[in-house]
Image (spheres, rainbow, N blue to C red):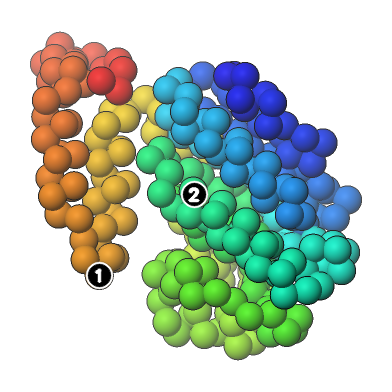
Amino acid sequence: MNDAAVAAQTEKMLSRKEGHVGTIIFNNPERHNAVSLEMWETTARMLEAFAADDEVRVVVLTGAGNKAFVSGADISKFESERATEEAVARYNATSERLHAIIQNFEKPIIAKIRGYCIGGGLGLAVACDIRICSENSRFGVPAAKLGLGYAYSGTKRLVDTVGIAFAKELFFTAKQFTAREAYEMGLVNRVVPDAELDAVVQDYADTIAQNAPLTIKTAKYTIKQTVEREPDLAGCAERVRQCFASNDYVEGRRAFMEKRKPVFTGT
């Protein structure tokens, strides 16, 4: 792993790199991986390190232990981190910066969800590209039970993912929903048995990492543009041009003709 990623690690936030897959772990299991301001800041630094590492082609976000992905903000920290208008503004700006980094990240990000995925944890998962959860996972937005306001950007990401009707159900009821209900909403891509979650996510990550990085980068950017009010059509076209001009396009054609697996370099 590069030095920046190692330096970013703390007791509550861990990261590792295996092959082309980078993993970030929320390590606060005694509080169901509830997140503090410092943990949001550390996650942003870890992602920036993986973004700068050309060896990393896909990132997995997950939580330590067997009970939670991320159960939301650490309420025990509210008095010190969110008690005044200035503190709330700083917390919200830090959280939104992280979500913006995730949403604009050029490499795919997979949320590996086991157990509780609540509040800020659900917002974090929704910002990721693919969400795979275990059958025992639970999802919810408890803001209405805490008197919190939910910002436009996070609300829009949820609406873009599940649609208006389910977004209203999640917000208005503040209920927890099962993994199967989350799948029916379109909140998660896959629901798998708990014992298979690690293997399934690893297979997804390895499969993505073996594919052409420039093609995936182009697809992620273009898909994002489809929900923008003013899509960057020129930027999409330029990325497509770069794919066809790449060494990987040559390798993909040759591998197909030679009936072998391609070896892509991202160039």
- Which is nearer the N-term, disc 1 or disc 2? 2
Residue, far top = 258
Looking at the picture, tell me which residue is in the foreground, 235 or 188.
235
Quadrant location of the C terminus in the rendered image = top left
Disc 2 residue type (three-letter): Ile
Whole-percent x, y for residue 29 in the image: 83, 48
Whole-percent x, y for residue 63 in the image: 70, 46
**Which residue is denoted by mark 1 in the rendering?**
229
Residue, far front = 86
In this picture, is 98 found above or below 200? below
Q: CA distance from mark 1 to mark 2?
A: 20 Å
Quadrant location of the N terminus in the rendered image = top right
Residue 33 located left or right of residue 143: right
The residue that appears at 38% across and 40% down in the rendered structure is 106
The residue that appears at 45% across and 84% down in the rendered structure is 165
Instruction: Check if mark 1's residue and mark 2's residue have beta carbons within 8 Å.
Output: no
The residue that appears at 18% across and 17% down in the rendered structure is 247
Residue 142 located left or right of residue 99: right
**Which residue is denoted by mark 2 in the rendering?**
102
Q: Helix, strand or loop at disc 1?
A: loop
In this picture, is 52 found above or below 157? above
In this picture, is 238 found above or below 79? above
Q: Helix, strand or loop at disc 2?
A: helix
